[in-house]
Amino acid sequence: MPHLNPYRIGFRTIKTAIGMALGIMIAQFMGLQNFASSAILVVLCIKHTKVHSVNAIVSRFVSCIMILILGSLVFSLLGQNALVLGLIVLLFIPLTVVFKVQEGIVTSCVILLHVFNAKSIDLHLFINEILLLIVGLGIAFLMNLIMPSLDKTLNNYKTQIEEQFTTIFESFKMTCNVPHDSLDIKFKSLEKTISAAKSTAFRDVKNHFVRNENSYYHYFDMREEQLELMKRMTFLLQNLETDDHMLTKFADLFGELAHNVNSNDYTALRLHSLYQLRLELNNLELPKTHESFRTRASLFQLLNELEEYLMIKSEFGSLKLHSDLYNK
């Protein structure tokens, strides 16, 4: 038996249902012919974001005006029959590509059929079709102004990512305290979380007309860069060949990082601790064996990766939300 998806009514579904009903009622109240077509316009123009909705509305309005003019002229000259209808479509579709309004082809075909079935092609038909467009597209625009806030979802993603970062650094700390223990870190899960968070943040940008960027998106992008460095740190820790007394101090540093993942002002302090470690490593005598030498080289490389990790956070600064900036 095929697996069925769980039944749920989403916010977009509710808006579509209300918009369709309103479109038909208003168009019918205005006495427009083909009033049910206003519901089709609503369905086609309700999108996931406000920006996409506006783009769809503009594209459909322009293409519908084009087909209204083209259809009226050609039908008036050649007659209202199926062959002429096919000829108009043959000419019209490439025209929408030229003007980059091909998203409105389906809607335009609805308008074209109205002209095709009209008893007479006159000013009344033009006014009727334009009013249908205004009603359907206008309701779709109003419905799309109502968008749920994504701040709670984005903040939940932020919390999840920071918790997973903390877990990873605690694993690094344990490995430094007990060298040669295997590191089993689920990077794939964290990568999926960050990818989903970035997608949601990008959608949030498209729900605002007054800004074209999102601090959350930059935050998740910063975490994605740091994740790549953490993967390299994992490789270095897994390939330590000998014990080194400096690993205890590395464990302390990883512990500090684990407890300050979500802090906005920890970077300078951690960099200070890192530079102290680097000075101590520089002042140590050279290892006596090849294995110890390779381990010491890995520790130096580990410090480089940690420094890059902290510098990325330092350049990002703190997570500044648009609402916080606007209220200042």
Image: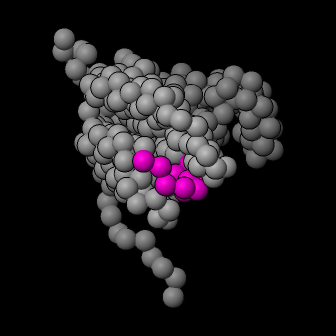
Q: In this view, does 71 lie above or below 168?
A: above
| Relative image position of residue 108 (x, y in whole percent) | 61, 36
Between residue 97 and residue 303, name the one nearer to us: 303
Task: Indicate whether residue 6 is drawn in magenta.
Answer: no
Residue depicted at x 31% and y 60%: 9
Residue drawn 24% across the image and 15% down it: 326
Q: 295 or 288: nearer the eye?
A: 288
**From where the camera sits, is residue 49 visible?**
no
Q: How is the image coloured?
A: one colour
Magenta stretch secondary structure, dominant: loop
Q: Look at the picture and state if 304 lies above or below 176.
A: above
Q: How many labels does the image show?
A: 0
Judged from this view, the residue extending furthest toward the top is 328
Give the residue drawn at x 37%, y 56%: 177
Stretch of the chain drawn in magenta: 235-245
Quarter residue 201 falls in: top left
Residue 156 vs residue 318, the one in the foreground: 318
> Quick check: 70 left or right of 18?
right
- Whether residue 166 is visible here, answered yes or no, is yes
Residue 6: quarter of image = bottom left
Percent position of residue 320, x then y: 29, 23
Horizontally, residue 319 falls left or right of residue 310, namely left
Position of residue 75 measured from the top left corner of the image (x, y, whole percent)? 72, 32
Magenta span includes 238: yes
Residue at the extreme bottom of the image, as rendered: 1
Using the image, determine if residue 235 lies above or below residue 256: below
Q: Residue at 74%, 24% (x, y): give it.
A: 98
Query: The C terminus lies in which quarter of the figure?
Result: top left
Asked whether 232 or 189 is in front, the reply is 232
